[in-house]
Amino acid sequence: MSTEHTSRRTFAIISHPDAGKTTLTEKLLYAGGAIHRAGAVRARGEARRARSDWMKIEQDRGISVTSSVMTFEYRDLTFNLLDTPGHEDFSEDTYRTLTAVDSAVMVIDAAKGIEAQTLKLFEVCRLRDIPIITLVNKTDREGRDPFETLDEIQEALALDVCPMVWPIGMGGLFEGCYDMVNNRFLTAPEKGGAFEDVIDCDGPDDEALDARVNEATLEQAREEMELAQIGYTEFDLDSYREGHLTPVVFGSALKDFGVTQLLDLIADFAPPPRPSPTDERVIEPSEKPVSGFVFKVQANMDANHRDRIAFMRVCSGEFKRGMKLRQVRTGKDLMLHSPIFFLAQDREIADNASPGDIIGIPNHGTVRVGDTFTEGEKLRFTGLPAFAPEILRRVMLKDTSKVKQLRRALEDLAEEGLVQVFRPQSGGNWIVGVIGVLQLEVLVSRARQEYKIGVRIEDLPYSSARWLRAEDPKVLDAFVKQNSFNIVEDSEGLPVYLAKSDWDLDYTERNNEDISFLKTRELQ
Ligand code: G4P
């Protein structure tokens, strides 16, 4: 039985735009000595590590696909950082990526607290009990009182908080951070500089601090730390792993404060690959046969060839290049002779992937988001959701003779997870649902470039969609008939109710108590 998987930490960073996710990502990669990414992919130092095939594809084709999976080593562990697209292409992809991680780091701006997108992403983590470590970032700038932020996390997210690294001053007064777990003062050689020195202390009252920190700032920080240590929950591993408690690090990604502390927390406490639920049984990562599921499909690698990369998280077994795996949905075997590995560091392990790792499967549209791969066992990984779209629009063809091409384009893009496609019961034009408006722009541009069709997006009077479910099929049928103008079918043929307002939805729900109006559904 392999124990490789216990050395994996597969995680994502969740945050609101501008909180510092990119900065933190770079610092983590840097700390792990991995390829450095800052807009363009570039290797750090001499090519200490061979670049992955994936990067080569990017470079050869001259396109800048942001790395979706970034792998680096730290303290004998392999970290897989899965990128959750930020504000620019926020979509279901973001949510689904969270189904492929075992833990998350939540980045909050010290001045702004919890913002809308953090909250949304947090809710997804909560659905899956994903444990979260929090970085309150930008303490080198003027921020809110640390207690205010801690109380907000506690109240808004219903999480116990356990502060572990505390800021000594903030903004203009910022002098570093104090690691309350290891009793270390993290400081810079000069005020306003980046983190460089670690001073071991006996506790926050250690005299070593007096010599380094302004008296008033230190006095306040000492008081705060005392209050923080008695005012909040003690760290409890089970509570963290069950998603009830979050360790909190105050720091500055830009100035390197708190970055290694975060990495240490992930290394020490974040769970290794967890067992994965399926419709048949729970799969343990230590099982020998290889299994995995696809949580993301990325197209547009090459617009002329319409090739795609499916991202599969390995859930069990030791995957080897050239292996044959069965795509359970179709029952077809797929020979994976050229999978893309994200383990870039050396040739030997680049041919294998362990549970918790991600491999890229090149394909021409045969692999879908939600697909399960096994060595033959018939099962389906569950928990991969489709979310009720928040934006619904009608898609109109500029040239009405291109109906077939439009159907193909919408089917393809829906399988990739870019948009959800609905067909009105009453016939008529396709309706697409998205989570963010940018997806609509991508739809129009890809329809033009890849499918050579012009489409126009028109507003609709609907503001939300809900999947319908009822114990009694007759009840559902009757509802669907009565409300046929507001009912559409999704790509699986499931009925979906479109509501014109929150009031409308609420009213309809209250008048149809035998029917569930669902915000999410499992991908089949
Ligand atoms: P995002 O990916 O979450 O959207 O955030 P990103 O890392 O791009 O950071 C957003 C802005 O916040 C950037 O500034 C970045 O430099 C800054 N930032 C990130 N972490 C810290 C921190 O710890 N302290 C301070 N003071 N600033 C931080 P920008 O002006 O938008 O970009 P740039 O000109 O600095 O590149």
Image (cartoon, helix red, strand yellow):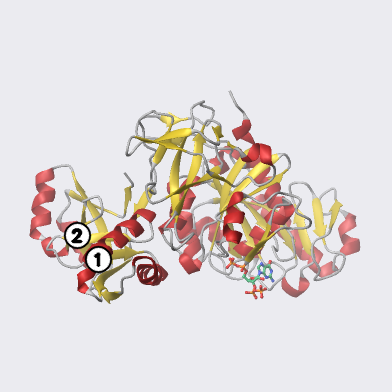
**In terms of depth relative to the viewer, which is nearer, 302 or 112?**
302
Question: Ligand 1 quadrant?
Answer: bottom right
- Reading the image, the residue beneath label 1 is 431
Label 1: few (<14), some (14–19) or many (≥20) C-alpha neighbours in 10 Å: many
Measured along the vertical axis of the image, is residue 53 above or below residue 392? above
Say what amino acid the circle numbered 2 marks. Val
Query: The residue under label 1 is which amino acid type?
Result: Ile
Point out residue 124 in the picture as x, y percentages from the top left corner: 44, 52
Q: What residue does disc 2 label?
A: 488
Give the image location of residue 103, x and y in percent. Answer: 55, 46
Of residue 318 and residue 282, the one placed in the foreground of this image is 318
Q: Give the image quarter of residue 474.
A: top left
Label 2's element? strand
What residue do we see at 52% from left, 36% from top?
274
The residue lying at 35 percent from left, 68 percent from top is 447
Q: Is residue 322 visible?
A: yes
How far across and how far down the image is residue 435, in percent?
A: 38, 64
Left or right for 107, reference 211? left
Q: Is residue 444 left or right of residue 399?
A: right
Percent across and percent down for residue 401 are 20, 71
Which secondary structure lies at badge 1? strand
The quarter of the displayed image where residue 153 is located: bottom right
Q: Which residue lies most toward the front here?
A: 304
